[in-house]
Image (cartoon, rainbow, N blue to C red):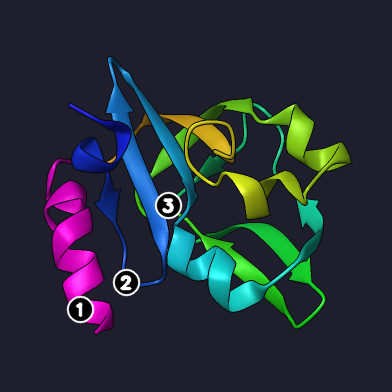
């Protein structure tokens, strides 16, 4: 299965991909397109814990500043350090190399049931 086939998306344009016990979180291609050229990204620190719906990061583009919300509850286990120095990488690849954080899921499975498959997410955007 490809990254996109495994991806679940929130209505606020974040994605989640399960990889073993870890969940990778980032922004969808639609969110990046809407933002335009990314110029700044502020990520949390490893060990921070968030509930579903909490703001966990801030992003700025030439067009707008925006908050990024947690699609699931979790404890941050890793952040994508490359993006802090080069947030514009998100414009080139928001999936394979452009993930934002990795978390250990601390919520229940109901949280995942609220998320959409990528195909359903794209359909909802139309």
Left or right: residue 61 versus residue 36 is right
Quadrant in which the N terminus is drawn: top left
Q: Position of residue 42 (x, y in %)?
A: 77, 52
**Residue at figure coordinates x 46%, y 30% from the top left:** 103
Task: Give the quadrant of the C terminus.
Answer: bottom left
Q: Residue furthest right?
A: 85
Near mark 3 (Cα within 10 A), the count class, few <14, some 14-19 or many ≥20, is some
State the image coordinates of residue 79 (x, y, percent, origin top left). 65, 30
Q: Residues within 10 Å of mark 2 (few under 14, many from 20)?
A: few
> SS of the residue at dot 1?
helix
- Label 3's element? loop
- CA–CA distance in space, label 3 to label 1: 25 Å
- Identify the residue at the far top of this view: 20
Camera sees residue 105: yes
Image quadrant assignment for residue 28: bottom left
Q: Which residue is mark 1?
A: 124
Which residue was labeled with disc 2?
11
Residue wearing tag 3: 51
Residue lying furthest front: 92
Residue drawn at point x = 31 percent, y = 63 percent: 10
Magenta range is 108-126
Where in the figure is residue 106, as x and y percent of width and height? 34, 34
Mark 2–mark 1 CB contact (< 8 Å): yes
């Amino acid at each position: 299965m490809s990254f996109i086939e495994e991806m679940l998306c929130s209505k606020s344009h974040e994605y989640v991909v399960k990889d073993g016990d870890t969940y990778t979180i980032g922004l969808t291609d639609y969110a990046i397109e809407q933002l335009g050229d990314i110029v700044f990204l502020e990520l949390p620190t490893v060990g921070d814990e968030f509930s579903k719906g909490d703001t966990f990061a801030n992003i700025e583009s030439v067009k707008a500043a925006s908050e990024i919300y947690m699609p699931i509850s979790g404890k941050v286990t890793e952040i994508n350090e490359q993006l802090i120095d080069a947030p514009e990488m998100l414009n080139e690849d928001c999936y394979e190399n452009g993930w934002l954080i990795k978390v250990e899921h601390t919520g229940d499975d109901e949280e995942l049931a609220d998320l959409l498959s990528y195909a359903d997410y794209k359909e909802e955007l139309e």
